[in-house]
Amino acid sequence: MLNQVQIPAHLKRYISKQRYEQYTPINQAVWRYVMRQNFHFFKERAHIAYRDGLTQSGISIERIPRIEEMDQCLQPFGWGAVPIDGLIPGVAFFDFQARGLLPIATDIRTLEHIAYTPAPDIIHEAAGHAPILCDHQYAEYVKIFGKIGAKALASKQENEVFQATRRLTLVMEDPHSTLDEIKQAEKELEEKVAKATEVSEATQISRLYWWTVEYGLIGDLDHPKIYGAGLLSSIGEGQHCLSDEVKKLPFDLEACITTDYDVTKPQPQLFVCHDFSELITAVEQFSERMAFRIGGNEGLEKAVQSGDVATAEYDTGVQISGVFTQLVKDQNGKAIYMRTAGPTALAYSYKELQGHGILRHTHGFGAPIGSIRGIDGLSSIQKGALIDLEYDSGIRLKGILKEWVNVNFQPVLLTLINCTVTYQDQVLFHPDWGEYDLIIGEKVVSVFAGAADPEKFFADENVELESEYVNTVTFSSLDHLYQKVRDIREKRQSSKDLPSIIRSLDDLYPNDWLLRLEILELCIEQEEFVSLAEKLKADLTKLKQKNSSLSFLIENGVKLIN
């Protein structure tokens, strides 16, 4: 069983339950077809870790994996696996990986999208991501990437692009979607993309992730091997990517973070790294320009632009977590005061300060930035004393000391009553607003996405993973035919039923190609069904002629059987 204790509260909202019994026989056949094709093709063309990594990570070619089994199998490699429900925000996805948890979407692509789907599914995230994690250096890269990526700040517009992308992928994968619904989702995404004119650090690092973890090649530029999960889980693109039609470029950090991608289309170029250590160097190099490394004005501006929960850390170690909405600046454009709106919490070294969680700071928080004149005398001031402070920036603060918080015998937080904070003619805080908590700190040295102590900040989101509601799946008559063939292949049923299954296919499902391939595989193995095999080959040829989009799938299936 998954160890739910290891999953932090703020990530539990993304966890789902893999209801294995709801996978249909057609789902299982889709998995088997894709995995047989991919294993046959990739065993010599993928990174050396792929072949053994499949079984080591708990993945079978014959059936959809159980995520609980994968979780156990990945533990020797310092990893685990958790089920999630579809596409989740990049920060959350990276946060899982930073903790050595591989998030796996429990859905599986439909037969109509068997070659490729833009929506996350179990083929992509289990068979694509997990095998290469059995390589120690690659597993280290993904974990390091997760720790850095989880701190990346996005913009409000990019968050809207993410939501629109999620809707489009779901609509495209849904077999019941109409053409108008798909066009509407595409139009919405185009509109959101057009508004997102600035590229945030979250988008840049997502691009680096895409061109490495998702679509990366490794080794010799002329004869590279595949390690990207998007390639290892796509029949079409995985085979197409090594052709001359796809440009192979030497891995370059700047090229990766400035090259955008389209999740709904095959990629026109790919980047080839020498080895995984090159990737570790690159992501650490990129982190040096991120807000969590540089802080200051630039970092605070990114936090305001994100419109989401972020954390600003002072040089004293005190951290403010909330949605940053405003920066007051001096005549030189330097931020001298910052404000959050809504629930805000204060922490020290990633642990919430007692009594300073979101219940105390429900409606936001304000804090000055900069050096204070005469601050040396603060440590000797008694409770009830009048505090009169002036910052070099011109901010003035007056109030009566109620209490303070010390760290290493130094005050890091003062609580004042009857407090007024002003800057020139602006009132930044008024006594009528209640008590004022003053953070002692001169510089903001780090700004990053999320809360400093997410366990406390998002405690209310600690949802139960179990649900009483179970959506029962009703198997179709076609599902039952697929199950019969599976039972025959696994020796649970006699092969004498194959002719009657074919007759049912001909009568009810003349356009189904995958089950005919599975039956052909069984017929070729037995001399008594030679005539049936020839009939099936003829049927499959007709289906190719009738629908050209099936040619690639059918030809590859027949080739593998032969």
Image: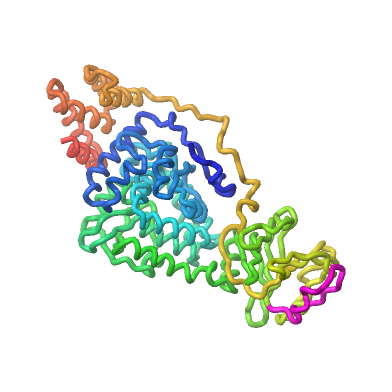
Residue 461 appears left or right of 104: right
Determine if the magenta segment contains residue 386: yes
Magenta stretch bounds: 371-389
Q: Residue furthest front?
A: 409
Of the 4 image quadrants, the one containing the C terminus is top left
Number of numbered discs overlaid on the protein picture: 0
Q: Is residue 188 visible?
A: no
- At x 60% / y 41%, what residue is drawn? 463
Residue closer to the observer: 520 or 546: 520
Please state the horizontal and vertical placement of residue 312, each as a whole percent of the image.
62, 66
Please state the horizontal and vertical placement of residue 494, each as a whole percent of the image.
24, 18
Residue 336 appears left or right of 190: right
Tell me the quarter of the picture where residue 211 sits.
bottom left
Please state the horizontal and vertical placement of residue 517, each as a whole percent of the image.
23, 32
Residue closer to the observer: 142 or 477: 142
- At x 76% / y 70%, what residue is drawn? 428
- Compared to residue 55, the image places residue 334 above or below, namely below
Q: Is residue 179 visible?
A: yes
- At x 77% / y 73%, what residue is drawn? 379
- Compared to residue 464, the image places residue 281 above or below, namely below
Residue closer to the observer: 151 or 474: 151
Determine if the magenta segment contains residue 508: no
Residue 398 appears left or right of 79: right
Residue closer to the observer: 89 or 186: 89
